[in-house]
Structures are given as C-alpha cells and as structure tokens.
Image: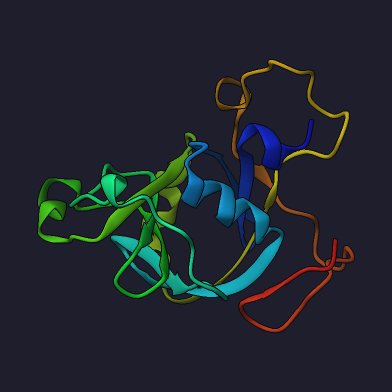
Amino acid sequence: MTGQEDGGIEFSFGSTVVPAVLNGSKTACAFARLLPLETTLCGTGIALCGALPEPLPVNPEQIHRGWQNGDINYCTEGGWLSVLVGDEENSARYGGQVTLGHLAEGWAALEGLVGEVPVRVAASCQAGDTPAGSDLAAEASVREAPAEGDPVEKTPRGKRYPV
C-alpha cells in the first residue's frame, strides 16, 4: 500500500517535513494523483497558498466556508492549494473551500513562513513500507528533510515529478 492509497503524504518545507493525511474525497484523490509535486506557495502567517498545475474535480456538497487550523484545502474559486495554519476563528468569511485533509502535529512551525516558500508534496511511504490497515495519522511525526547535498529531483514550479 502506498502513502497515496492510504492518504499519508508529507509536505517538505526546506528542512522541515510535516506529515498529513488526505480524507479520501474525490478532490483529495485527484490531488494525490498529482504527487509528487514541487511548487512554490505564498506564506502569509495564516496560510501557505499556491496554484495547482490543473483544476481538481469537486463535489458541490463538500464546498464550505472557513477551516480548522492545520487543514489542507482546495479553493474552488482559483484552483489554489491552501495549507492553513492560523486565523481559524475568522475563517468563515472565506468561501469556496473543500477540505482535502489535515496536517499532523508540528504544523504550528509553519506559521512563521512568509513570502515565497518552496514546497515538495509526496506520498509519505513507498509500497511495502506500511502494513495494510495501519493508521498513518497516529504514527505521524515531524522529521527532518534530507541533508543539504542529498539528491532531490527538481522540476519546474508547479510540475509533477516523473513516477
């Protein structure tokens, strides 16, 4: 079972890797098919947002207003990926939200990321790494990204990695 099949993914922001779990919705599954993905998000202290390389399918019944801190959302009005880390109490003013999943512990460290922030999003494990039925959300923890100089395949911003 791969991380994409069971919803386990990782957001790598420089040397910080934050695990997350996708919720299995049609929109989340379409997002998982884009992985691995390297792009640049714009950090505001409240959210890290950026355009996805293609629009995602949406179930209109899942569109809502607002978020919970730590949510990973798709904004239908602009095709944006949003990693939401603050201002939950005032978020109801933002519509067109579809929740894709949620970051595991450690997401509060992302509140200080402001401006252009490179990110790599990938499945959290490879085939055979996780036993069937395991709960990646319970096992998730923040860890360090590969050391400087370790090989990491790069592609142009917003493009998919070859599989």
Residue 49 sits in which quadrant?
Answer: bottom left
Quadrant, the N terminus: top right
Residue 158 sits in which quadrant?
Answer: bottom right
Residue 88 position within the rendered picture, expressed as x and y whole percent measured from the top left: 20, 47
**In-front residue for pair 97/144:** 97
Above or below residue 12? Residue 5 is above
Furthest toward the top, the residue is 133
- Give the left or right position of residue 112, taking residue 106 as reference: left
Residue 79 position within the rendered picture, expressed as x and y whole percent measured from the top left: 41, 71
Which residue sits at x=71%, y=59%?
A: 36
- Give the left or right position of residue 45, taking residue 20 as reference: left
Residue 15 position within the rendered picture, expressed as x and y whole percent measured from the top left: 65, 58
Residue 51 position within the rendered picture, expressed as x and y whole percent measured from the top left: 46, 75
- Give the left or right position of residue 139, taking residue 41 as reference: right
Count the marks: 0
Above or below residue 48? Residue 108 is above
**In-front residue for pair 113/28:** 28
**In-front residue for pair 147/66:** 66
Which residue sits at x=47%, y=41%?
A: 25
Above or below residue 6? Residue 44 is below
Which residue sits at x=30%, y=44%?
A: 69
Which residue sits at x=27%, y=51%?
A: 63
